Image (cartoon, rainbow, N blue to C red):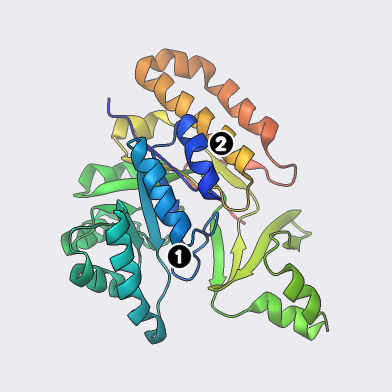
C-alpha cells in the first residue's frame, strides 16, 4: 500500500523540524502578498531557511502563490518565481493561469500544483490542468468521499485532499472588517488588532461562530467547525490518494504538531495493520477531541453528508 504524503502548514520556520519529527512529509509556506490564507508568514529569508531545513531531512516545501492577481502584481511574479527556483522550492501552488504562464517562462522545471479551493470537483478539470503542466490537483472541500475516490480513479495527476482543519466559506477583496470598524468610529482599534485572529460572526440561530479575518488579500470568513477524518482514512488510503493535508490556519504550533503526530500514527497503523487501525481509530479521534478548542467542534465536512453552515 502506498503511503500518502502528510502535508502540513507551519506557522514559523521554527516549526519545520518539530513537525518533521511528528511525521510531516511536506509543507505549505508563503507570504500573503502572493498566497491565500496561510498559517504563517514566510518572507524570503524564512522561506529559504525552511527549504534548507526540510531538504536536510529529505522533506519537501511547496510555496503558495494561489492569489488572484491583478495587473499590478504580475511583474512581481517574475522575480518571486526566480527566487523560488534559486532556493529549490519543490513546487508552486497556483490557481491563476497567469502564474502558470510566468512559471513556464521563468522556471519551466518547477512542479506546479493546481489549487483553486472550490473548482476541483471533477477529474476532467483536474486532467485539463494536468495537461497544461500541473503535476497535482487539490480537490474542493465540498466533495463526498465517493466523489473523491471516483476522481482519483480517473485522474492523470496526483490528488491532494484536506483531511483536517477549517475551510473557507467566503472571501472578498474588500476590507469589510476595516470598513465596519471605520463605520463604528473605531479605526484605531482595527489598526492595532488587524493581525489578531479573534473576530467572529455569531449565528445565534445555529449557535455557530464563524472566524473572520482581514489581510492583504481582503476579508476571509471561515467554517465554524474543523474537518477531522483521522478515524475515516481507510477509503482514501485504499484509493491511493497522494497527499493528505492538515490545514493549521488560526491554530497554534503545539496544536498543529499534536494533530500531525496523530495523523502520522493513524496512517502508519493502517499501512502496517488495518485491523489495528479499526480497533484504535476511535481513540485517535478522542486524542484530537481533547486538544480541540472549545468553540470549534469536529465534523467530517462534506465527506459523508451535506454539511450546512
Residue drawn at (57%, 51%) of the image: 166
Q: Tag 2's secondary structure?
A: helix
The residue carrying mark 1 is 35
The picture places residue 136, in percent across and down from the top left corner, at 27, 52
The picture places residue 116, in percent across and down from the top left corner, at 39, 63
Residue drawn at (56%, 36%) of the image: 257
From this view, report whether residue 135 is shown above or below residue 235: below
The residue carrying mark 2 is 257
The picture places residue 132, in percent across and down from the top left corner, at 18, 64
Q: Is residue 94 left or right of residue 134?
A: right
From this view, report whether residue 3 is shown above or below residue 223: above
The picture places residue 191, in percent across and down from the top left corner, at 73, 75
Residue drawn at (53%, 43%) of the image: 15
Query: Quadrant of the image for the C terminus?
Result: bottom right
Q: Is residue 96 visible?
A: no
From this view, report whether residue 36 is shown above or below residue 182: above
Amino acid at each position: 500500500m502506498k503511503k500518502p504524503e502528510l502535508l502540513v502548514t507551519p506557522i514559523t520556520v521554527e516549526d519545520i523540524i518539530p513537525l518533521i519529527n511528528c511525521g510531516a512529509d511536506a509543507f505549505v509556506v508563503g507570504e500573503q502578498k502572493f498566497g491565500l490564507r496561510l498559517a504563517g508568514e514566510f518572507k524570503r529569508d524564512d522561506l529559504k531557511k525552511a527549504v534548507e531545513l526540510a531538504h536536510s531531512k529529505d522533506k519537501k516545501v511547496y510555496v503558495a502563490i494561489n492569489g488572484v492577481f491583478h495587473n499590478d502584481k504580475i511583474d512581481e511574479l517574475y522575480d518571486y518565481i526566480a527566487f523560488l527556483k534559486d532556493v529549490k522550492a519543490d513546487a508552486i501552488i497556483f490557481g491563476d493561469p497567469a502564474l502558470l504562464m510566468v512559471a513556464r517562462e521563468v522556471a519551466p522545471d518547477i512542479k506546479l500544483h493546481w489549487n483553486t479551493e472550490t473548482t476541483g470537483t471533477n477529474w476532467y478539470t483536474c486532467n485539463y490542468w494536468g495537461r497544461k503542466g500541473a503535476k497535482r490537483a487539490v480537490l474542493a472541500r465540498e466533495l463526498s468521499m465517493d466523489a473523491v475516490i471516483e476522481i482519483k480513479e480517473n485522474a492523470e495527476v496526483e490528488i491532494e485532499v484536506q483531511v483536517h482543519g477549517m475551510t473557507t466559506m467566503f472571501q472578498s477583496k474588500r476590507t469589510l472588517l476595516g470598513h465596519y470598524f471605520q463605520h463604528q468610529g473605531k479605526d484605531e482599534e482595527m489598526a492595532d488588532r488587524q493581525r489578531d485572529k479573534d473576530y467572529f460572526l455569531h449565528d445565534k440561530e445555529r449557535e455557530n461562530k464563524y472566524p473572520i479575518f482581514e489581510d492583504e488579500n481582503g476579508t476571509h470568513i471561515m467554517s465554524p467547525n474543523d474537518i477531522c477524518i483521522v478515524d475515516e482514512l481507510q477509503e482514501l488510503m485504499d484509493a491511493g490518494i497522494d497527499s493528505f493535508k492538515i490545514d493549521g490556519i488560526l491554530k497554534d504550533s503545539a496544536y498543529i504538531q499534536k494533530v500531525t503526530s496523530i495523523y502520522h500514527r493513524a496512517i502508519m497503523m493502517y499501512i502496517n495493520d488495518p485491523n489495528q487501525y479499526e480497533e484504535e481509530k476511535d481513540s485517535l479521534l478522542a486524542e484530537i477531541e481533547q486538544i480541540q478548542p472549545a468553540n470549534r467542534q469536529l465534523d467530517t465536512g462534506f465527506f459523508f453528508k451535506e454539511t450546512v453552515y
